[in-house]
């Protein structure tokens, strides 16, 4: 348990866990025990999937293997190597989605400005992404390259389950596109078969004290805007 975290015997209910989950962007180097990650996987793999296909193949990296992946990611980033993810990034968002993305980026820039110790340089923020925010472990979710949208949706359900199960273990998480920017580097280090796409990465570990005290959380759309009811 991180030294700054108060002992908490209260188990989060679902609502509390959904509200407590956030994207951690600064991890302590404290290792995460394999036994703890196994407990998380035991619970999270109860996630639903299309026709119970359970299309996921899970690879978890820590220690020196993860450090090699991290170093190679940062090397390619510094060399300007374009990301080449197995699942292409969205290149064009509708204006409303783009506006929300710009608003949260502006919020984080403002937070950095108000905290003198934090860099507001965009490239440094990118570099932290490519360095996995200093996380001591990363969970990679993979699936067969022949599979399509619905299987990728299933991986999303699994990812949410992993993040919520991690909370019960007092762990923080971050799912970020940059975690799988250079899939061949991950594939080579973790011996992931070539027929699998490296689809999603989840950084996991103990957030720093600053992360836990930070009240900057991405806002959510109002239900009036996002949800439509009919027949009630």
Image (tube, helix red, strand yellow):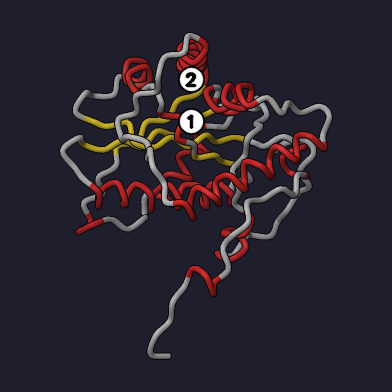
Mark sitting earlier along the chain (1/2):
2
Determine whether, in the image, residue 87 is placed left or right of residue 132: left
* Other residues around mark 2 within 10 Å, as few (<14) / some (14–19) / many (≥20): many
Name the residue furthest front.
95
Q: Quadrant of residue 127?
A: top right
Q: Is residue 195 above or below residue 70?
A: below
Task: Point out residue 3 in the picture as x, y percentages from the top left corner.
Answer: 78, 36
- Judging by the rendered image, the residue that carries numbered circle 1 is 138
- Judging by the rendered image, the residue that carries numbered circle 2 is 66
Identify the residue at horizontal 60%, vertical 48% (top origin). 22
Which quadrant does the N terminus fall into?
Answer: top right
* Other residues around mark 1 within 10 Å, as few (<14) / some (14–19) / many (≥20): many
Determine whether, in the image, residue 209 is placed left or right of residue 54: right
Name the secondary structure under disc 2: helix
Task: Point out residue 78 in the picture as x, y percentages from the top left corner.
Answer: 52, 11
Task: Point out residue 71 in the picture as x, y percentages from the top left corner.
Answer: 51, 12
Residue nearer the viewer, 38 or 106: 106
User: Of the numbered discs in the image, which one, if any, rests on residue 79?
Assistant: none
Figure disc tally: 2
Q: Is residue 131 above or below residue 115?
A: above
* CB under 8 Å between discs 1 and 2: yes
Q: Quadrant of residue 114?
A: top right
Residue nearer the viewer, 57 or 76: 76
Task: Point out residue 211 in the picture as x, y percentages from the top left corner.
Answer: 72, 39
Name the residue furthest left.
146
Name the secondary structure under disc 1: strand
Identify the residue at horizontal 62%, vertical 59% (top origin). 19
């Amino acid at each position: 348990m991180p030294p700054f975290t108060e002992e908490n015997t209260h188990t989060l209910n679902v609502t509390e866990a959904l509200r407590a989950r956030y994207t951690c962007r600064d991890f302590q180097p404290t290792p995460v025990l394999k036994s703890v990650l196994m407990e998380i996987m035991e619970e999270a793999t109860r996630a639903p999937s299309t026709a119970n296909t359970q299309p996921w193949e899970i690879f978890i990296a820590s220690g020196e293997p993860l450090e090699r992946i991290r170093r190679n990611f940062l090397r390619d980033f510094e060399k300007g190597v374009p990301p080449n993810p197995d699942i292409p990034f969205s290149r064009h968002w509708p204006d409303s989605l783009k506006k929300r993305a710009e608003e949260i980026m502006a919020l984080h820039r403002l937070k950095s400005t108000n905290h003198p110790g934090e860099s507001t340089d965009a490239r440094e923020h990118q570099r932290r992404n490519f360095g996995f925010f200093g996380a001591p472990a990363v969970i990679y979710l993979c699936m067969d390259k022949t599979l399509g949208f619905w299987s990728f949706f299933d991986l999303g359900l699994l990812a949410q389950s992993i993040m919520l199960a991690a909370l019960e273990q007092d762990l923080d998480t971050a799912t970020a596109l940059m975690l799988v920017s250079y899939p061949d580097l991950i594939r080579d280090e973790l011996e992931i078969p070539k027929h699998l796409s490296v689809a999603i990465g989840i950084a996991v570990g103990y957030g720093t004290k600053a992360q836990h005290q930070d009240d900057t959380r991405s806002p959510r759309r109002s239900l009036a805007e996002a949800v439509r009811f009919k027949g009630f």
